[in-house]
Image: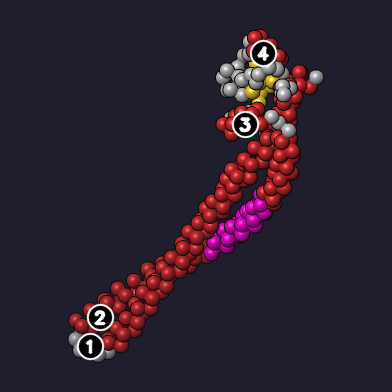
Amino acid sequence: MRIDLKQEIIKLVELQKIDSQIYALTRKKDIDNPIILSKIKNEFQEKAKILEEFEISAKETQINKKEKELDLATKEAAISKSNTQLYQLKTNKEYQAKLSEISSLKADISVLEDAVLTVLEKIEQAQAQLKKQREKVAQYEKESKEKENEILNEQKEIEIQLKIAQDKRGKISRDVDKAILSKYERLLNSRSGLALAPVNHDSCGACFLRTNHKTINEIKMYKDLIFCDSCVRILYIPEDIEG
């Protein structure tokens, strides 16, 4: 039985519309949305890392404070001990040496007290910055979760749309000649989901190669499938199909 090629192409045009939708939905589900989710996750991790750096800095400042306070306490204990020893010394030389030692310790204590005050200021600043950063990260985490949920909900909706489109595709493809369908599907897989191309203004609608009149006449004869010389897609005349 002779195949009505024009009718087969009409079916392929309808099939292509669905396949283009399936291709776009599949790309969004398997490539675009996972990239977005990964970006959201990476950006949040970067924000969390900055917060971690603030926390480490705040802890180091606290440790520095404790070290200086311990050093200060040690110096104060040394002065107390030296003051006690003053009354036990027997010579003026020993007495003067101990006084000099106490004076040096007091000078060290003065420096340490200033250092402790400086560290306390740094701690106050660090705590304020840490609080601000925690608030930022908490807000960003909330926004990130909302974005993730939007994408995940969209993924579910895409699954539903894909099921509908695939069911519709199955019905249409069953009516297409098997040999023609096989050629169409090979092109579909190798040409990024676009196996058919309309001839618009005497050019291929996919790659825009200029189509000569001989090729256009061959398309209109509907004896064989006519392929673009450049992108190898099946060519068709929209006005012919619609008419």
- Expressed as whole percent of the image width and height from the top left, the position of residue 46 reads 52, 53
How far apart marks 2 and 4 lie (CA) works out to 115 Å
Up the image or down, 24 lies above or below 92; here it is: above
User: Which of 126 and 86 lies nearest the eye of the viewer?
Assistant: 126
On whether residue 145 falls in the magenta region, the answer is yes
**Amino acid type at mark 3:** Ser
Residue at coordinates 56% horizontally, 48% vertically from top-left?
A: 39
- Expressed as whole percent of the image width and height from the top left, the position of residue 148 reads 64, 52
Q: Secondary structure at mark 3?
A: helix
Instruction: Residue under label 4, please give it.
Output: 218
* Category of crowding for the residue at label 1, using alpha-carbon neighbours closer than 10 angstroms: few (below 14), some (14–19), many (at least 20): few
User: Which of pointers 4 and 1 lies earlier in the amino acid sequence?
Assistant: 1
- Expressed as whole percent of the image width and height from the top left, the position of residue 49 reads 50, 56
User: Which of pointers 3 and 2 lies earlier in the amino acid sequence?
Assistant: 2
Q: How does the figure colour the protein chain or chains? A: secondary structure
Residue at coordinates 56% horizontally, 49% vertically from top-left?
A: 38
- Expressed as whole percent of the image width and height from the top left, the position of residue 221 reads 71, 14
Quadrant location of residue 200?
top right
Instruction: Residue under label 2, please give it.
Output: 98
Q: Which mark is residue 89?
A: 1
Residue at coordinates 73% horizontally, 22% vertically from top-left?
A: 4
Q: Secondary structure at mark 1?
A: loop
How far apart marks 4 and 3 lie (CA) works out to 21 Å
How far apart marks 2 and 1 lie (CA) works out to 9 Å
